[in-house]
Amino acid sequence: MSELLHLDGYGLFVWPCYGLTVAVLIGLTVRSVWRHRALQAGVSQLETLADATRAQPPSGSSLP
Amino acid sequence: MQHFANPARFLAFTRPIWPAALIGGAALTALGLGWGLFGTPPDYQQGQSAKIMYVHVPAAWMAMFVYMTMASASLVGFVWKHPVADMTAKSAAPIGAAFTGLALVTGALWGKPTWGTYWVWDARLTSVLVLFFMYLGYIALWEAIEDQRKAARAAAILALVGVVNIPIIKFSVDWWNSLHQPASISSLERIFDPAIHPSMLWPLLIVWVGYMVLFVGLVLVRTRSEILARRLERLRLQHASQETRVRDQDILGAPDLAEPDLAGLAPSGQFKGGPFEGGPFKGGQG
């Protein structure tokens, strides 16, 4: 195990490379998926709202 | 391609693809990286530091490939004015920047034990650094121009001009003296007769395929986000204008919608009553 960490002295260079690669790729993926999810939720929320107002034309008393 | 210029069709078509691509790409990348790290022999010259190859080389390939994808999409967007092409180019840029950044940093970490230095201003390293700045400039240009159509055109021109850099990166190790080694896998035919042992070639290729599939998933989900963001913006404007209309109708007695007898009786009472007091006319002070 310690040999794997050490990698003949190159561990100090090899492990950060792998760690950084995994961190950057996961970070990019998670951010992209989160943004997509949030936008999708926003769009469907406004779309149902628009559908509701279209089905029920606004009258003066419908104001909050 | 014409088919997908329609944003709604693009959204419908890509819905099942992007999650599959992200999962498949992540799995392949994990397999390749695990194989590279735990299942490969040390290099006869570079020892265990050669394990950096499995993250560095595919990232560097992707840095150039993503740029060419971005430039191609920019060209399509520029010539045929397809908004989905523009959005694809915009979506690819941060992914390309990420791969280029990874190639630079892992390259520096490989350079220290191998060459004795993290960085040297030679043709290969410098041209890849220029590529990194091209990506950042491209992203900044999109951010700087508010009108999305103008931003797309300006960014497309920048992306197309930057294509000059790609052959410079590719051939820099042949044209100039460089600390960087020349390509071991230089063309498609050489894949079957490469200057690299199969035990090292396989994990390398798997990481590369993993990165490619991951890129497809990422660019699709990001392009979808761009489409959805514009749709959300449009819906918000519609919603806002609808609300304004409702409020106006409420204040002015909505002659076309209000009941006839109320419309005949109400005006004076309505103007003195509620809506005006707290309405938009007071807004300047509040």
Image: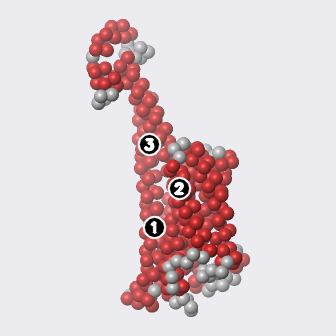
Q: Position of residue B198 (x, y in %)?
A: 61, 84
Which residue is drawn at the image coordinates 30% and 28% (left, top)?
B285
Residue B117, numbered circle: none
Of B275 and B16, nearer the camera is B275
Mark 1 packing: few (<14 Cα in 10 Å), some, or many (20+)?
A: some
Label 2 chain ID: B
User: Distance between the Cα atoms at labels 2 and 1?
Assistant: 18 Å
The image position of residue B286, as x and y in percent, is 29, 30
Residue in view at x 33 percent, y 28 percent = B284
- In the rendered structure, the residue with mark 1 lies on which chain? A
Q: Please tell me which residue lies in front, B205 or B275.
A: B275
Question: Which residue occupies 43% across, 29% down?
Answer: B242
For residue A56, what is the image quadrant?
A: top left
Name the residue carrying label 2: B139
Distance CA(mark 2)–CA(mark 3): 28 Å
- Residue B149 is situated, as x and y percent measured from the top left of the image, at 58, 44
**Mark 3 or mark 1, whichever is nearer to me:** 1
Measure how far apart labels 3 and 1 are at the Cα level: 30 Å
Label 1's element? helix
Query: Identity of the amino acid at label 1?
Result: Val
Above or below, comparing residue B211 to residue B82 in the picture? below
Q: Are marks 3 and 1 on the same chain?
A: yes
Which numbered marker is on residue A24?
1
Camera-side residue: B262 or B136? B136
Q: Which residue type does callout 2 highlight?
A: Ile
Mark 3, Cα crowd under 10 Å, few <14 / some 14-19 / many 20+, is some
